[in-house]
Image (cartoon, grey):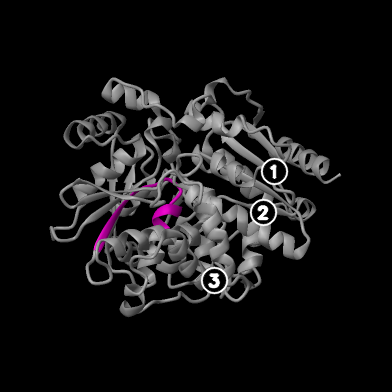
Amino acid sequence: MRYLSTRGEAPVREFEDVLLAGLAEDGGLFLPETWPELSAEEWRALRGLPYAELSARLMALFTAPAISEAELLTMTRAAYAGFGHAATAPLVQIEPGIFSLELFHGPTLAFKDMAMQLLGRLFDHVLAKRGQRVTIVGATSGDTGSAAIEACRDRAAVDMVILHPEGRTSAVQRRQMTTVLSPNIRNIAVQGSFDDCQDLVKAMFNDAPFRNEMKLSAVNSINWARIAAQIPYYAYAALALGAPDRPVAFSVPTGNFGNVLAAWVARRMGLPIERLIVGANRNDILARFITSNDMSARPVEPSLSPSMDIQVSSNFERLLFELLGRDAKATAETMTRFRAEGRMPVPDAAWKQATELFHGFTLSDEGTLEEIRRLYAESAYLADPHTAIGTAAARAMRPADAGIPVVVAATAHPAKFPDAVEKATGFRPALPPRMADLHEREERFEVLPADLEAIETVVRGHARRNAA
Protein backbone atom coordinates (compact mmCIF):
# COMPACT_ATOMS: atom_id res chain seq x y z
CA MET A 1 0.00 0.00 0.00
CA ARG A 2 1.36 3.38 -1.04
CA TYR A 3 0.15 6.84 -0.05
CA LEU A 4 -0.12 10.19 -1.80
CA SER A 5 -0.81 13.72 -0.58
CA THR A 6 -4.11 15.48 -1.18
CA ARG A 7 -2.11 18.43 -2.54
CA GLY A 8 0.02 16.41 -4.95
CA GLU A 9 3.48 17.89 -4.23
CA ALA A 10 4.84 15.40 -1.67
CA PRO A 11 6.60 12.12 -2.54
CA VAL A 12 4.53 8.93 -2.60
CA ARG A 13 5.23 6.90 0.55
CA GLU A 14 4.59 3.57 2.25
CA PHE A 15 2.78 3.17 5.55
CA GLU A 16 5.72 3.47 7.96
CA ASP A 17 6.82 6.77 6.46
CA VAL A 18 3.26 8.09 6.54
CA LEU A 19 2.96 7.10 10.20
CA LEU A 20 6.10 9.01 11.16
CA ALA A 21 5.50 11.99 8.86
CA GLY A 22 1.92 12.76 9.94
CA LEU A 23 1.37 15.77 7.69
CA ALA A 24 2.73 15.80 4.13
CA GLU A 25 5.48 18.31 3.33
CA ASP A 26 3.17 20.20 0.95
CA GLY A 27 0.67 20.77 3.76
CA GLY A 28 -1.67 18.07 2.47
CA LEU A 29 -2.94 14.89 4.10
CA PHE A 30 -1.97 11.37 3.11
CA LEU A 31 -4.45 8.94 1.54
CA PRO A 32 -4.00 5.49 -0.05
CA GLU A 33 -3.19 5.51 -3.76
CA THR A 34 -5.98 2.96 -4.22
CA TRP A 35 -8.72 1.89 -1.82
CA PRO A 36 -8.80 -1.77 -0.75
CA GLU A 37 -12.17 -3.39 -1.41
CA LEU A 38 -13.63 -6.55 0.13
CA SER A 39 -16.27 -8.72 -1.49
CA ALA A 40 -19.46 -9.64 0.32
CA GLU A 41 -18.01 -13.09 0.91
CA GLU A 42 -14.87 -11.61 2.44
CA TRP A 43 -16.91 -9.39 4.75
CA ARG A 44 -19.01 -12.37 5.85
CA ALA A 45 -15.84 -14.24 6.77
CA LEU A 46 -15.03 -11.51 9.29
CA ARG A 47 -18.27 -11.88 11.26
CA GLY A 48 -17.87 -12.93 14.85
CA LEU A 49 -14.15 -12.21 15.12
CA PRO A 50 -12.91 -10.75 18.43
CA TYR A 51 -12.30 -7.04 18.07
CA ALA A 52 -8.50 -7.28 18.20
CA GLU A 53 -8.44 -9.87 15.44
CA LEU A 54 -10.85 -7.94 13.21
CA SER A 55 -8.76 -4.82 13.73
CA ALA A 56 -5.56 -6.60 12.70
CA ARG A 57 -7.21 -8.09 9.60
CA LEU A 58 -8.45 -4.71 8.35
CA MET A 59 -5.41 -2.68 9.38
CA ALA A 60 -3.14 -5.10 7.50
CA LEU A 61 -4.76 -3.90 4.26
CA PHE A 62 -3.25 -0.47 4.92
CA THR A 63 0.12 -1.42 6.47
CA ALA A 64 1.31 -4.07 3.98
CA PRO A 65 4.04 -4.88 3.19
CA ALA A 66 5.78 -2.93 5.95
CA ILE A 67 3.87 -4.45 8.90
CA SER A 68 2.35 -7.92 8.71
CA GLU A 69 -1.02 -9.08 10.00
CA ALA A 70 0.73 -11.27 12.57
CA GLU A 71 2.70 -8.28 13.89
CA LEU A 72 -0.47 -6.22 13.97
CA LEU A 73 -2.34 -8.92 15.89
CA THR A 74 0.29 -8.82 18.64
CA MET A 75 -0.17 -5.05 18.84
CA THR A 76 -3.98 -5.03 18.71
CA ARG A 77 -4.26 -7.68 21.41
CA ALA A 78 -2.01 -5.60 23.67
CA ALA A 79 -3.77 -2.35 22.76
CA TYR A 80 -7.27 -3.55 23.71
CA ALA A 81 -6.39 -5.90 26.57
CA GLY A 82 -6.83 -3.19 29.20
CA PHE A 83 -10.22 -1.92 28.05
CA GLY A 84 -13.00 -1.95 30.64
CA HIS A 85 -15.40 -4.10 28.64
CA ALA A 86 -14.78 -7.60 27.30
CA ALA A 87 -16.32 -6.68 23.94
CA THR A 88 -13.96 -3.66 23.58
CA ALA A 89 -16.66 -1.71 21.69
CA PRO A 90 -20.05 -3.08 22.85
CA LEU A 91 -23.19 -2.41 20.83
CA VAL A 92 -26.18 -1.43 23.00
CA GLN A 93 -29.76 -1.02 21.76
CA ILE A 94 -31.22 2.19 23.19
CA GLU A 95 -34.54 2.19 21.31
CA PRO A 96 -36.09 0.38 18.36
CA GLY A 97 -33.75 0.62 15.41
CA ILE A 98 -31.12 2.76 17.17
CA PHE A 99 -27.97 1.36 18.75
CA SER A 100 -25.12 2.91 20.71
CA LEU A 101 -21.62 1.78 19.77
CA GLU A 102 -19.75 2.42 23.02
CA LEU A 103 -16.24 3.54 22.15
CA PHE A 104 -15.35 4.87 25.60
CA HIS A 105 -14.17 1.81 27.52
CA GLY A 106 -10.47 2.55 27.04
CA PRO A 107 -8.06 4.04 29.59
CA THR A 108 -9.14 7.68 29.06
CA LEU A 109 -12.86 6.99 28.58
CA ALA A 110 -13.10 8.36 25.03
CA PHE A 111 -13.23 7.01 21.49
CA LYS A 112 -9.72 8.35 20.81
CA ASP A 113 -8.37 5.38 22.79
CA MET A 114 -9.61 3.02 20.08
CA ALA A 115 -6.96 4.32 17.69
CA MET A 116 -4.41 5.83 20.04
CA GLN A 117 -3.67 2.69 22.05
CA LEU A 118 -2.73 1.01 18.78
CA LEU A 119 -0.89 4.07 17.45
CA GLY A 120 1.49 4.12 20.42
CA ARG A 121 2.48 0.53 19.71
CA LEU A 122 2.88 1.24 16.00
CA PHE A 123 5.28 4.08 16.82
CA ASP A 124 7.27 1.82 19.14
CA HIS A 125 7.46 -0.91 16.51
CA VAL A 126 8.64 1.33 13.69
CA LEU A 127 11.00 3.50 15.74
CA ALA A 128 12.67 0.46 17.32
CA LYS A 129 13.15 -1.13 13.90
CA ARG A 130 14.69 2.07 12.54
CA GLY A 131 16.62 3.11 15.63
CA GLN A 132 15.00 6.56 15.51
CA ARG A 133 13.43 9.05 17.92
CA VAL A 134 10.54 11.46 17.19
CA THR A 135 8.92 14.50 18.76
CA ILE A 136 5.14 14.26 18.62
CA VAL A 137 3.17 17.51 18.73
CA GLY A 138 -0.60 17.46 18.92
CA ALA A 139 -3.59 19.75 19.34
CA THR A 140 -6.63 18.64 21.29
CA SER A 141 -10.13 19.91 21.90
CA GLY A 142 -10.27 17.59 24.90
CA ASP A 143 -9.99 13.86 24.22
CA THR A 144 -7.17 13.37 21.71
CA GLY A 145 -4.58 14.77 24.11
CA SER A 146 -5.31 12.48 27.02
CA ALA A 147 -5.57 9.43 24.77
CA ALA A 148 -2.27 10.29 23.08
CA ILE A 149 -0.53 10.92 26.39
CA GLU A 150 -1.79 7.65 27.84
CA ALA A 151 -0.62 5.78 24.75
CA CYS A 152 2.85 7.38 24.62
CA ARG A 153 3.78 8.09 28.24
CA ASP A 154 7.22 6.76 29.21
CA ARG A 155 7.98 5.47 25.71
CA ALA A 156 11.73 5.64 25.18
CA ALA A 157 11.78 6.91 21.59
CA VAL A 158 8.95 9.46 21.81
CA ASP A 159 8.82 12.99 23.22
CA MET A 160 5.35 14.55 23.25
CA VAL A 161 3.98 18.09 23.53
CA ILE A 162 0.19 18.53 23.59
CA LEU A 163 -1.59 21.86 23.10
CA HIS A 164 -5.07 22.39 24.51
CA PRO A 165 -7.20 25.57 24.54
CA GLU A 166 -7.03 27.14 27.99
CA GLY A 167 -10.35 26.87 29.85
CA ARG A 168 -12.15 25.19 26.96
CA THR A 169 -12.01 21.55 28.02
CA SER A 170 -13.85 19.91 30.89
CA ALA A 171 -11.92 19.63 34.17
CA VAL A 172 -11.77 15.85 33.74
CA GLN A 173 -10.40 16.17 30.21
CA ARG A 174 -7.75 18.65 31.34
CA ARG A 175 -6.67 16.65 34.37
CA GLN A 176 -6.37 13.43 32.36
CA MET A 177 -3.62 15.24 30.45
CA THR A 178 -1.99 17.44 33.03
CA THR A 179 -1.68 14.89 35.85
CA VAL A 180 0.54 12.60 33.77
CA LEU A 181 4.00 13.54 35.07
CA SER A 182 6.08 11.29 32.81
CA PRO A 183 9.30 13.05 31.73
CA ASN A 184 8.59 12.62 28.01
CA ILE A 185 5.24 14.47 28.26
CA ARG A 186 4.69 18.26 28.17
CA ASN A 187 1.31 20.03 28.32
CA ILE A 188 0.65 23.57 27.10
CA ALA A 189 -2.59 25.49 27.64
CA VAL A 190 -2.88 27.88 24.70
CA GLN A 191 -4.68 31.19 25.16
CA GLY A 192 -7.13 30.66 22.31
CA SER A 193 -9.42 28.10 20.70
CA PHE A 194 -8.80 24.58 19.45
CA ASP A 195 -8.49 25.99 15.94
CA ASP A 196 -5.61 28.16 17.22
CA CYS A 197 -3.95 25.04 18.67
CA GLN A 198 -4.44 23.15 15.43
CA ASP A 199 -3.03 26.06 13.39
CA LEU A 200 0.07 26.11 15.60
CA VAL A 201 0.66 22.40 15.06
CA LYS A 202 0.28 22.77 11.29
CA ALA A 203 2.61 25.79 11.34
CA MET A 204 5.28 23.74 13.09
CA PHE A 205 5.00 21.07 10.41
CA ASN A 206 5.18 23.71 7.68
CA ASP A 207 8.35 25.18 9.26
CA ALA A 208 10.67 22.79 7.40
CA PRO A 209 13.91 23.51 9.35
CA PHE A 210 12.11 23.09 12.69
CA ARG A 211 10.24 20.00 11.48
CA ASN A 212 13.48 18.32 10.41
CA GLU A 213 15.42 19.37 13.50
CA MET A 214 12.77 18.04 15.88
CA LYS A 215 11.85 15.01 13.72
CA LEU A 216 8.21 16.00 14.16
CA SER A 217 5.39 13.51 14.02
CA ALA A 218 1.65 13.80 14.68
CA VAL A 219 -1.08 11.95 16.55
CA ASN A 220 -3.99 14.15 15.53
CA SER A 221 -6.27 12.68 12.92
CA ILE A 222 -4.15 14.43 10.30
CA ASN A 223 -2.09 11.23 10.75
CA TRP A 224 -3.55 8.62 8.41
CA ALA A 225 -2.82 5.81 10.89
CA ARG A 226 -5.41 7.33 13.23
CA ILE A 227 -8.12 7.07 10.58
CA ALA A 228 -7.10 3.55 9.59
CA ALA A 229 -7.32 2.38 13.20
CA GLN A 230 -10.88 3.72 13.49
CA ILE A 231 -12.25 1.85 10.50
CA PRO A 232 -12.53 -1.52 12.33
CA TYR A 233 -15.15 -0.40 14.84
CA TYR A 234 -17.54 0.61 12.07
CA ALA A 235 -17.03 -2.79 10.49
CA TYR A 236 -17.49 -4.46 13.90
CA ALA A 237 -20.89 -2.80 14.40
CA ALA A 238 -22.10 -3.28 10.82
CA LEU A 239 -21.17 -6.98 10.78
CA ALA A 240 -22.92 -7.51 14.13
CA LEU A 241 -26.13 -6.06 12.64
CA GLY A 242 -26.09 -8.22 9.52
CA ALA A 243 -23.76 -6.58 7.02
CA PRO A 244 -22.95 -7.15 4.25
CA ASP A 245 -26.43 -8.61 3.79
CA ARG A 246 -28.15 -5.74 5.58
CA PRO A 247 -27.47 -2.03 5.12
CA VAL A 248 -26.74 0.14 8.16
CA ALA A 249 -26.48 3.87 8.92
CA PHE A 250 -24.17 5.68 11.34
CA SER A 251 -24.72 8.85 13.33
CA VAL A 252 -21.43 10.44 14.33
CA PRO A 253 -20.99 13.54 16.50
CA THR A 254 -17.96 15.15 14.92
CA GLY A 255 -15.81 18.26 14.92
CA ASN A 256 -12.60 17.51 13.03
CA PHE A 257 -14.32 15.06 10.61
CA GLY A 258 -11.87 12.22 11.31
CA ASN A 259 -14.29 9.86 13.03
CA VAL A 260 -16.98 10.08 10.35
CA LEU A 261 -14.33 9.92 7.63
CA ALA A 262 -13.34 6.48 8.94
CA ALA A 263 -16.95 5.38 8.41
CA TRP A 264 -16.79 6.77 4.87
CA VAL A 265 -13.66 4.67 4.24
CA ALA A 266 -15.42 1.55 5.56
CA ARG A 267 -18.16 2.20 3.01
CA ARG A 268 -15.56 2.74 0.29
CA MET A 269 -14.16 -0.69 1.20
CA GLY A 270 -17.51 -2.32 0.48
CA LEU A 271 -19.63 -2.16 3.63
CA PRO A 272 -23.29 -1.33 2.82
CA ILE A 273 -23.49 1.96 4.73
CA GLU A 274 -26.69 3.66 3.62
CA ARG A 275 -26.30 7.00 5.38
CA LEU A 276 -23.75 8.96 7.42
CA ILE A 277 -25.32 11.48 9.79
CA VAL A 278 -23.01 14.25 10.97
CA GLY A 279 -24.01 15.68 14.36
CA ALA A 280 -22.90 19.19 15.29
CA ASN A 281 -23.30 21.68 18.13
CA ARG A 282 -23.48 25.46 17.70
CA ASN A 283 -20.13 25.25 15.87
CA ASP A 284 -21.97 23.81 12.92
CA ILE A 285 -19.73 24.39 9.89
CA LEU A 286 -19.96 20.76 8.76
CA ALA A 287 -23.74 20.60 9.11
CA ARG A 288 -24.08 23.90 7.23
CA PHE A 289 -21.94 22.57 4.42
CA ILE A 290 -24.02 19.42 4.09
CA THR A 291 -27.39 21.17 4.22
CA SER A 292 -26.62 24.28 2.14
CA ASN A 293 -23.05 24.15 0.77
CA ASP A 294 -22.02 26.81 3.29
CA MET A 295 -18.47 25.97 4.39
CA SER A 296 -17.72 29.32 6.03
CA ALA A 297 -15.76 29.62 9.25
CA ARG A 298 -17.18 31.59 12.17
CA PRO A 299 -15.69 32.33 15.60
CA VAL A 300 -15.57 29.22 17.79
CA GLU A 301 -18.17 29.31 20.55
CA PRO A 302 -17.75 27.26 23.75
CA SER A 303 -20.46 24.65 24.26
CA LEU A 304 -21.46 21.71 26.46
CA SER A 305 -19.78 19.42 23.91
CA PRO A 306 -16.28 20.96 23.81
CA SER A 307 -14.63 18.24 21.73
CA MET A 308 -16.74 19.51 18.83
CA ASP A 309 -15.96 23.21 19.31
CA ILE A 310 -14.14 23.40 15.98
CA GLN A 311 -14.59 25.49 12.84
CA VAL A 312 -11.68 24.24 10.74
CA SER A 313 -12.20 20.50 10.25
CA SER A 314 -8.85 19.17 9.05
CA ASN A 315 -10.04 15.82 7.76
CA PHE A 316 -12.58 17.38 5.45
CA GLU A 317 -9.67 17.92 3.05
CA ARG A 318 -9.47 14.15 2.49
CA LEU A 319 -13.14 13.98 1.51
CA LEU A 320 -12.80 17.12 -0.62
CA PHE A 321 -9.95 15.46 -2.54
CA GLU A 322 -12.25 12.55 -3.36
CA LEU A 323 -15.22 14.78 -4.21
CA LEU A 324 -13.01 16.72 -6.64
CA GLY A 325 -12.06 13.53 -8.46
CA ARG A 326 -8.66 13.32 -6.73
CA ASP A 327 -7.60 16.59 -8.36
CA ALA A 328 -4.70 17.61 -6.11
CA LYS A 329 -4.27 21.03 -7.70
CA ALA A 330 -7.94 21.92 -7.21
CA THR A 331 -7.82 20.61 -3.64
CA ALA A 332 -4.75 22.72 -2.80
CA GLU A 333 -6.29 25.84 -4.35
CA THR A 334 -9.59 25.32 -2.50
CA MET A 335 -7.87 24.81 0.87
CA THR A 336 -5.58 27.80 0.36
CA ARG A 337 -8.56 29.99 -0.44
CA PHE A 338 -10.42 28.71 2.62
CA ARG A 339 -7.52 29.60 4.89
CA ALA A 340 -7.24 33.06 3.30
CA GLU A 341 -10.94 33.96 3.11
CA GLY A 342 -12.61 31.72 5.70
CA ARG A 343 -14.97 30.33 3.08
CA MET A 344 -14.61 27.19 0.97
CA PRO A 345 -16.00 27.32 -2.58
CA VAL A 346 -17.05 23.69 -3.16
CA PRO A 347 -18.49 23.15 -6.67
CA ASP A 348 -22.20 22.30 -6.65
CA ALA A 349 -21.60 18.94 -8.33
CA ALA A 350 -19.15 17.90 -5.60
CA TRP A 351 -21.48 19.15 -2.86
CA LYS A 352 -24.46 17.27 -4.30
CA GLN A 353 -22.37 14.12 -4.44
CA ALA A 354 -21.61 14.53 -0.72
CA THR A 355 -25.28 14.99 0.16
CA GLU A 356 -26.16 11.64 -1.39
CA LEU A 357 -24.50 10.01 1.64
CA PHE A 358 -23.97 12.67 4.32
CA HIS A 359 -26.78 14.32 6.28
CA GLY A 360 -26.20 17.19 8.70
CA PHE A 361 -27.85 17.87 12.06
CA THR A 362 -27.32 20.64 14.60
CA LEU A 363 -28.33 20.65 18.28
CA SER A 364 -28.18 23.52 20.77
CA ASP A 365 -26.93 23.19 24.34
CA GLU A 366 -30.53 23.27 25.55
CA GLY A 367 -31.44 20.51 23.12
CA THR A 368 -28.43 18.51 24.25
CA LEU A 369 -29.51 18.66 27.89
CA GLU A 370 -33.05 17.66 26.92
CA GLU A 371 -31.72 14.69 24.95
CA ILE A 372 -29.60 13.51 27.91
CA ARG A 373 -32.73 13.76 30.11
CA ARG A 374 -34.89 11.95 27.57
CA LEU A 375 -32.44 9.09 27.06
CA TYR A 376 -32.11 8.51 30.77
CA ALA A 377 -35.85 8.71 31.44
CA GLU A 378 -36.98 6.58 28.52
CA SER A 379 -34.13 4.09 28.06
CA ALA A 380 -32.17 4.25 31.34
CA TYR A 381 -29.19 5.18 29.17
CA LEU A 382 -26.74 7.79 30.40
CA ALA A 383 -25.05 9.69 27.58
CA ASP A 384 -22.42 12.39 27.54
CA PRO A 385 -23.23 15.61 25.62
CA HIS A 386 -21.47 14.50 22.41
CA THR A 387 -23.23 11.14 22.30
CA ALA A 388 -26.55 12.86 23.03
CA ILE A 389 -26.10 14.95 19.88
CA GLY A 390 -25.51 11.70 18.01
CA THR A 391 -28.66 10.05 19.35
CA ALA A 392 -30.83 13.08 18.62
CA ALA A 393 -29.39 13.19 15.10
CA ALA A 394 -30.12 9.49 14.65
CA ARG A 395 -33.79 9.96 15.51
CA ALA A 396 -34.19 13.06 13.36
CA MET A 397 -32.29 11.90 10.28
CA ARG A 398 -32.76 8.13 10.21
CA PRO A 399 -33.45 6.48 6.82
CA ALA A 400 -37.07 6.14 5.77
CA ASP A 401 -36.64 2.36 5.61
CA ALA A 402 -37.28 1.24 9.20
CA GLY A 403 -35.34 -1.95 8.54
CA ILE A 404 -32.05 -0.04 8.36
CA PRO A 405 -30.59 0.26 11.88
CA VAL A 406 -28.80 3.44 12.91
CA VAL A 407 -25.65 3.12 14.99
CA VAL A 408 -24.60 6.09 17.11
CA ALA A 409 -20.90 6.53 17.79
CA ALA A 410 -20.89 6.96 21.59
CA THR A 411 -17.69 8.93 21.85
CA ALA A 412 -17.15 9.60 25.56
CA HIS A 413 -18.06 8.31 29.01
CA PRO A 414 -20.63 10.55 30.74
CA ALA A 415 -18.28 10.99 33.72
CA LYS A 416 -15.98 13.07 31.52
CA PHE A 417 -18.67 15.77 31.45
CA PRO A 418 -20.24 15.60 34.92
CA ASP A 419 -21.49 19.19 35.00
CA ALA A 420 -23.63 18.78 31.89
CA VAL A 421 -24.93 15.37 32.95
CA GLU A 422 -25.80 16.68 36.41
CA LYS A 423 -27.61 19.66 34.92
CA ALA A 424 -29.68 17.31 32.78
CA THR A 425 -30.36 14.50 35.25
CA GLY A 426 -29.75 15.87 38.75
CA PHE A 427 -26.81 13.64 39.60
CA ARG A 428 -23.10 13.49 38.80
CA PRO A 429 -21.84 10.32 37.15
CA ALA A 430 -18.92 8.77 38.99
CA LEU A 431 -15.54 8.18 37.45
CA PRO A 432 -14.44 4.53 37.26
CA PRO A 433 -12.51 3.37 40.36
CA ARG A 434 -9.15 3.62 38.58
CA MET A 435 -9.72 7.38 38.19
CA ALA A 436 -11.47 8.10 41.48
CA ASP A 437 -8.58 10.26 42.76
CA LEU A 438 -8.18 12.26 39.52
CA HIS A 439 -9.15 15.58 41.12
CA GLU A 440 -6.56 15.14 43.88
CA ARG A 441 -3.60 14.42 41.58
CA GLU A 442 -0.86 16.99 40.96
CA GLU A 443 -1.19 18.92 37.70
CA ARG A 444 1.68 20.09 35.51
CA PHE A 445 1.20 22.44 32.53
CA GLU A 446 2.06 25.94 31.39
CA VAL A 447 -0.05 28.68 29.85
CA LEU A 448 1.28 30.33 26.67
CA PRO A 449 -0.10 32.71 24.03
CA ALA A 450 -1.00 31.40 20.58
CA ASP A 451 2.45 32.41 19.34
CA LEU A 452 4.44 30.07 17.10
CA GLU A 453 7.88 31.21 18.29
CA ALA A 454 6.97 30.72 21.95
CA ILE A 455 5.53 27.26 21.31
CA GLU A 456 8.50 26.14 19.20
CA THR A 457 10.89 27.27 21.95
CA VAL A 458 9.14 25.03 24.46
CA VAL A 459 9.01 22.07 22.06
CA ARG A 460 12.71 22.42 21.22
CA GLY A 461 13.74 22.62 24.88
CA HIS A 462 11.61 19.61 25.81
CA ALA A 463 12.95 17.41 23.01
CA ARG A 464 16.59 18.39 23.55
CA ARG A 465 16.39 17.78 27.29
CA ASN A 466 15.04 14.28 26.81
CA ALA A 467 17.44 13.41 24.01
CA ALA A 468 20.49 14.52 25.98
Kindly identify which numbered label has been placed on residue 259: none
For image coordinates 45% across by 42% down, the residue present is 110
Residue designated by label 2: 217
Among numbered discs 3 and 2, the one appearing first in the sequence: 3
| Mark 3 closeness class: few <14, some 14–19, many ≥20 residues within 10 Å | some
The residues colored magenta run: 248-261
Q: How many marks?
A: 3
Q: Give the x, y percent position of residue 279.
A: 32, 46
Q: Amino acid at mark 1?
A: Asp
For image coordinates 32% across by 58% down, the residue present is 237
**Considering the numbered disc 2 on the image, is that residue within a helix, a strand or a loop?**
strand
Separation of marks 1 and 2 at Cα, in angstroms = 17 Å
- Closer to the observer: label 3 or label 2? 3
Q: Residue furthest right?
A: 468
Q: Give the x, y percent position of residue 245.
A: 23, 72
Residue 133 seen anywhere in this rendered image of the structure: yes
Residue 39 in which image quadrant? bottom left
Among numbered discs 1 and 2, the one appearing first in the sequence: 1
Quarter of the C terminus within the rendering: top right
Among numbered discs 1 and 3, the one appearing first in the sequence: 3
Residue designated by label 1: 154
Q: Give the x, y percent position of residue 134.
A: 73, 53
**Considering the numbered disc 3 on the image, is that residue within a helix, a strand or a loop?**
helix
Q: Amino acid at mark 2?
A: Ser
The residue closer to the viewer here, 65 or 135, is: 65
Residue 352 in which image quadrant? bottom left
